[in-house]
Image (cartoon, helix red, strand yellow):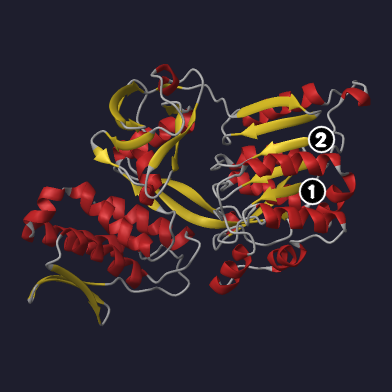
Amino acid sequence: MQAVLSTALGAVLERHLEAAPPADLGLWTLRGLEVLDPQLKAEMRSGTLLLNAGDRLLAARPLPPSLPNAPPDATAPGLALGLSALFEAAWQHSSLLRRAGPERMLRSGFEELFNHLDPYSRYLTPEEAEAARGRRVGQVGLGLRLAAGRGREVVLATILPGGPAAAAGLRPNDRVMAIDGTTVSADDLVGAAFLLEGPAGSEVVLRLQRGGRRFTVRLLRSLLPPETVHAERRDDILWLRLDNFSSATDRHVLEALAEGFPPDGARATRPRGVVLDLRGNRGGLLGQAVAVAGAFLPGGVVAQTAGRHPDAARVYLATLGDRTGGAPVVVLVDGRTASAAEIVAAALADQGRAVVVGSATTGKGLVQLVMPLPNGGELLVTWSRVLAPLGWPLQGLGVLPALCTSLGEEATAAGLARLRLDSPPMAAALARERAARAPVPASEVAALRETCPPAEGKPADTAVARLLLTEPASYEAALAR
């Protein structure tokens, strides 16, 4: 435990986006034990960490001294030594902790620590880390995607062809009631998705409801092909829907663009434009986002990252060249568009290369570093924030569309009417967003997102995209920066 704490706290002290004093990190970590046993109380007095059980002092450990000009992580070994002694004292005293086990103690400590820092850093046990490594190497899954339904319901949003879910006859909108006996709720959609994860060849049991009938299905996890790109040409438009950004997404996008816009093809046979549908796309690999955006850009910046650690400052450039010959592009987004998908939408919008349609996106613009731990676990440490090409942060703000569809049909029609008069309806909000710099006040974040509240994608989105691609003047008005 001491080695795990030393490595983990060193990573946080050295690399986390926000600097925090070692004393606070130690106290927050120790307070994680209170969650497992409310009789325990952690406090700090005069540079000493104290652990009490009621009125009784169980143990006390002084904080290591801070040395001038020492690296940020220099105090991590001494802090970990003191914390491991306090954890041991708590273990000896509390039967609740002994029943929970060392891994649960570590998880609770890290959860409390990260509750004070950011929503994305987290600790993975050795078993969870092994499954995560498997997913990074190759997609392991069930061929389905979850979403929030009515109220607190969890439903199947997408069933991938050829996957285990499709073979079992599952359908979109089937309600998921429990996964391996654990009841699920839309209040914790991430937790529900995590229950689905596991190594290839393992089994998961789903309790489902379809209409008034409830039934149970056993699915065997398998290695799924990365079917992340769906291309279709209709209405003289190339429609590209991206489910996420996996290791082969850029290749499939380039193939679809090469087929639609062959270098030696006649211009008359090319589509009039491209609709890039990123609704519901929760992101994926940053490098893939850069490559996909680069397939529509002649050059320039796709994204930037910035953080406290020197290595966090990076600039990502478009290097592939525009594979569409400058054809007009509409990007569809919604409230579930996140992370890498937001990077693509922001890059194409900031560079004046595409019109974004839909609603405000999720606003997930923080990057996590994966830190291996001595016990085989992993620590995901948020160490940089993503900035759009014009310098505004994606975190919290998300990407605002040039034409909003989440305010209803009348508002959408009014927005289109303003575009026809060369009066972009979202111009003021977009100007404020692009002028924002981190950290953005919460009041400004809320005000900007209220101009086009995040919502699930709507059927009107595709109709608006088609209309913009057939009305060049409206498209150009929406594109204006």
Residue 109 image offset from top left, x and y in percent: 27, 58
Label 2 Cα crowd, 10 Å radius (few <14 / some 14-19 / many 20+): many
- Horizontally, is 14 left or right of 445 in the view? left
* Dot in front, 2 or 1: 2
Residue assigned mark 2: 273
Judging depth in this view, the residue of 273 and 438 nearest the camera is 273
Vertical comparison of 152 with 310: above or below? above
Judging depth in this view, the residue of 72 and 406 nearest the camera is 406
Residue found at x 57% / y 39%: 285
Q: How many marks?
A: 2
| Amino acid type shown at disc 1 | Gly
Residue 196 image offset from top left, x and y in percent: 36, 34
Residue found at x 11% / y 49%: 99
Quadrant of the image occupied by residue 220: top left
Residue 413 badge: none
Instruction: Point out the image quarter for the C terminus.
Output: bottom right
Residue 472 image offset from top left, x and y in percent: 88, 44
Residue assigned mark 1: 300
Residue 362 image offset from top left, x and y in percent: 55, 53
- Horizontally, is 187 left or right of 255 in the view? left
Label located before the other in sequence (2 or 1): 2
| Amino acid type shown at disc 2 | Gly
